[in-house]
Amino acid sequence: MKPVTLITGASAGIGAELARVFAAHGHELFLVARRADRLNALADAIAASGRPRPVVLTADLEKRDAAAALAAELSSRGLEPSFVVNNAGFGLSGSAAALSRDEQLGMIDLNVRVLTELSLTFIDSLARNRGGILNVASIAAFLPGPGMAVYYASKAFVLSFSEALHQELSGRGIRVTALCPGPVETEFQARSGMTLPAVAKIFELPSRRVAEIGYDALMRGQRVAIVGLGNRIAVAIMRFIPNALLLRMVDRRMGGANQS
Ligand SMILES: NC(=O)c1ccc[n+]([C@@H]2O[C@H](COP(=O)([O-])OP(=O)(O)OC[C@H]3O[C@@H](n4cnc5c(N)ncnc54)[C@H](OP(=O)(O)O)[C@@H]3O)[C@@H](O)[C@H]2O)c1
């Protein structure tokens, strides 16, 4: 079986940059997202840079059978993951009670369920290849997020799960890293129905830089990588702020809880 790096959500934003960074370091890629045109354009660009053309697979990872279908596709092509990058994810802004329940459950399917399944499905081949798992969490993982409640909770899961997996799999030579970016201007904002506030600009980093930091952290075997000094300071300060105050500070809903 030929080793490849599996990257989900590679058609845009941080995932597309992760694909470029892994390719630049000589990894052969297996890229997954729903938009075939975007994936193919990226695969062509990587091939044009002199690297092997990534294999692309269009799949909706919110679907229950997505991970099994993906594993079958890899195996039918004689491929096995040496690295798994669980990057696909989205958020939704608004009060959890008012947002679509189906969409929020779909977010859990993508941000949590398929990430868990893909982290666990390929452990034997990750061990064989002395590879690893890069799970894209967020600085949202470090606090509850009224106004994006399910999203923040999903990222808290990703962080907790990845840290525990880092410990559990270290004996098998598998690296596991939780990558925690702060604000990054991508399609994420439009999809989640939010705009970055002016203050977020202080903490913002380009998606390329985020991808490079994630790659280096994974290769070093770092457990958690909070991206950027500003975000690291913000996370450190947050630990000293009582949750009751933090909840009011981060509440994204216009008009407060009684307006939802
Ligand atoms: N941008 C930020 O400020 C920020 C901050 C912290 C963490 N993050 C995290 O970083 C990760 C990447 O986000 P991004 O900012 O790069 O967002 P993005 O530009 O919206 O990209 C999201 C990627 O996920 C894919 N995706 C979405 N739904 C999918 C589905 N059902 N099945 C398969 N693929 C799907 C999208 O591809 P298709 O639409 O083609 O399927 C796209 O490639 C996410 O996990 C996000 O939570 C982002």
Image (cartoon, rainbow, N blue to C red):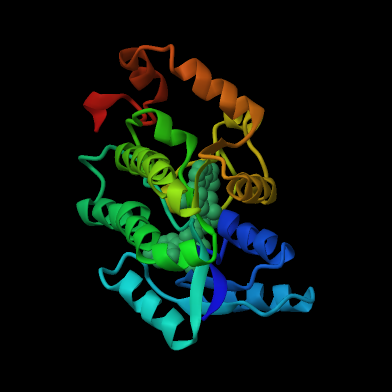
Tell me residue 256's x, y (percent). 30, 24
Q: Residue at x 28, y 37 (%)?
A: 95
Q: Residue at x 54, y 71 (%)?
A: 31
Nearest the viewer among 8 and 42 is 8
Residue 190 visible in the snapshot: no
Q: Residue at x 58, y 54 (%)?
A: 14
Task: Specify the quadrant of the image occupied by residue 98.
Answer: top left
Tell me residue 213's x, y (percent). 65, 44
Tell me residue 178's x, y (percent). 48, 43
Q: Quadrant of the C terminus?
A: top left
Q: Is residue 59 above or below residue 117?
A: below
Residue lying farthest front? Answer: 171
Tell me residue 202's x, y (percent). 65, 28
Q: Is residue 71 above or below residue 184?
A: below
Q: Is residue 28 above or below residue 108?
A: below
Nearest the viewer among 193 and 248 is 248
Q: Residue at x 22, y 56 (%)?
A: 102
Task: Specify the quadrant of the image occupied by residue 43.
Answer: bottom right
